[in-house]
Amino acid sequence: MPIPFRSSVLRALALVLAMSPATRAAPAPADLVVLNGKVLTVDDGFRVAEAVAIRDGVFVLVGTSAQARALVGPRTRVVDAAGKTVIPGLIDSHVHALGVAESQAGGSFRDLRTIAEIQAWIREQTAAARGGQWVFSPRVFPTRLAERRLPTRAELDEAAPRHPVVVDAAYALMVNTAALQAAGIGPDTPPPPGGSIVKDEQGRPTGLLRNVGGLLDRYKAGGRPERLLPALEEVHRRYNEVGITSVIERAASLAGYRAYAQLRDEGRQRVRATVTLRVDSDGTVEGTEAFIRSLALRFGDGDDRLRVGPLKIFADGGILAGTAFMRELYGPAAASLYGVADPAYRGFLTISAEKIRNIVRTGHRLGWQMCAHVTGDAGVDTVLDAFEAADADRPIRDRRFTLIHAYFPTAAVARRAAALGVAVDTQPAWYYKDADALLPALGEARLRPFLGLAEWLRAGVKVVLNTDHMFGVDPDHSLNPYNPFLTMYVAVTRRTEGGQVIGPEQAVSREDALRMMTANAAWLSFEENRKGSIEVGKLGDLAVLSDDYLACAPERIRAIRSLVTVLGGTVVYEADGRR
Ligand SMILES: [Zn+2]
C-alpha cells in the first residue's frame, strides 16, 4: 500500500508550487475528493457539508460537490459517497495495540466463556507442555463467564494436577496448587507491594491473588520480538477497517514507544499514534524524577504521526475482578462473583495516596500531562486529591489531566473534576459486556451511574470514549470489542449485551457520542487544531459509513461499518465491492 504520510520535503515542495504565480490563478487539483456525502464535520457548530477535498494531507475544502469538483484534476482520486455519511477519522483514545500484537504474535486469542471451556483449554495446553511448564490462560473476567465467578483452585487442579496454571483476570489471578508450590506461595508468604494473597480461615492461600501485577510474569515463556512489528501493523490495519485513523496507546514501556517509532521510520504506520508511558518508579519524588529523566523524551515531542503522550499511573484494580477501591463495602451479594469472604472488603489502592501524590506532582513539575487508571469511587477521590495537590503547586487547568475509567461518578465528583479541568477517558464496552453480571452483585443504586457519561457532561467535564482494546482482532468479539460504533451505540442507548437499560438518564446524544470519539479525543492529546473534525487546514482523515449514523434506527448503530477509510488524503481501507 502507498505510504499514507507525505514527507515534509514533498510538503515544502508543494507549498512552493502553490505559491508560484502559475498556480495562483487556478487552485491546484486535490489529491482526493469525496462528493455527494452527508459530511458530519463535528466542528463547533456540528455543521453538515456535502463534499470535501484533500491536498498534501490536509482538507483544503469543505463545501458542496460543485466546489469540490472544481478541484478534480487528472490524478485526483474521486470517492463518490452516494449519499452516505462521512465522519472525521475516528480516534480510539485508549487501546493496548502493543499488547494485542504481542499476544497475536504468540497465537490467536481464545474467548473462553465457561469454566468447562477453561478446563478443556488447560487440558489441551498441558498435554502439549513439558512437565513443570507454566500455563497462562487467555484473559477472562468473572463477569463474562457463564458461572459469573472465577474457577476455584480445585477446578484448576482437576484440569491440571501437575502443571502450574494461572487464570488471568487482569487485576486478579486464580492459580492452581502446582502454581502456588512452584512460586513458593504459602501461608506465611507476605503480600507483594500493592497486592494481596487471599487466604482461607485456616490461613492457607485459596489461589486467588489480587492486584499482584507482574508477580508471576517471570514464569511466562519469552515472546517472539521479531513477530511484534508485523503483528502491530496488522492490528492497526484492523483499526482502519472500522474507520479508526488515530489511537492513543494507553500504557507503553519505552520499548513500546520505540516499536511505534520503528513503524514510523519504516513507513509502515497506518494510524496516527500518541503513546502513553507507564510510570515505573518507587513512588518517591527522587525515584520518579529519575525514571522520567531516564526516558530521555519530552511530553508532546513528535509530529502528526507519532507523539509522546502523558504519563500513566495505576491507582487501583478493576470492578470486574472486585479490586476497584470503593467508598462502600462490596457487600454479601458480590461475594461469589469476586471470591470475597471478608464482609469489610471494599477493594484497595495498589499504591499509597502519598506515592500517587509524589508521582503526579513530580510529573507535573517536569511538564508532563498526567493520567491515572482509577476505577472505584474511593480511588477517584484519592487521585483528585493528588491532582489538587499538583494544582496548588502550579495550576493544572490547561494540562488536561485525566481520570481513566472512573466508573461511578456523582454530581459532586464531576464538579470537582470540572473545576480542575480534568478530563475523563472511559469505555462503554465495559458497561455493555459486564453490567448484566455486575447488577445483581452490586445492586441497582450503584449500577445506575456506572459509566455515567451524562453525569460528567452536566458538570462540563470533557469526556473521551474509547474501547480499551487489549486482546484479539475481531471488532465485535475481541477483548474489548474495538468496534467504535458499538461504543457509540452503548453511549447513546445505555443498552447492555443482555438487552437491559440500567440508568437511562446517563445516555448521551449521537452528536455527543461522536464528538467524544473525534474532537474530544483530539483535544485530549492537545491536537484539536490538527484533527478531530473536518475543517479546512486539518489533517485529511475521514471515514465513509455504511449507514446514516444520525438517522438510522438505534439498534443499527452498532452494525455500522466503514466503507472507505482515508488517512491524510490516502485511502487506507476500502470495503469489498467498492474497489
Ligand atoms: Zn487500558
Image: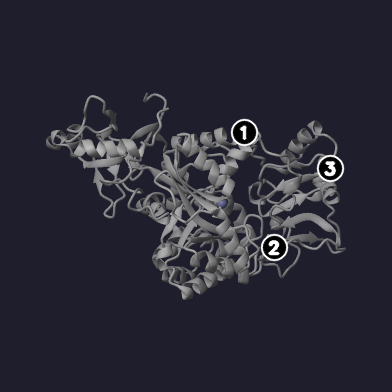
Q: Between disc 2 and disc 3, whose residue precedes?
A: 3
Which residue is more in the foreground, 43 or 443? 43
Residue at image point 21% right, 30% down? 72
Q: Position of residue 74 (x, y in %)?
A: 23, 24
Give the mark toward the camera: 3 or 1: 1
Q: Position of residue 576 (x, y in %)?
A: 42, 25
Which residue is more in the foreground, 5 or 190? 5
**What crowding class fits label 2: few (fewer than 14 Cα within 10 Å), some (14-19), or many (20 or more)?**
some
Give the mark toward the camera: 2 or 1: 1
Residue 575 in view = yes
Residue 547 in view = no
Q: From the image, tell me which residue sits under label 2.
A: 194
Disc 2, SS:
loop
Q: CA distance from mark 2 to mark 3?
A: 30 Å
Q: From the image, tell me which residue sits under label 1.
A: 226
**What crowding class fits label 1: few (fewer than 14 Cα within 10 Å), some (14-19), or many (20 or more)?**
few
Q: CA distance from mark 3 to mark 1?
A: 36 Å
Q: Are marks 2 and 3 in contact (CB under 8 Å)?
A: no
**Which residue is outermost to the bottom?**
392
Which amino acid, mark 1?
Glu
Label for residue 158? 3
Disc 3, SS:
helix
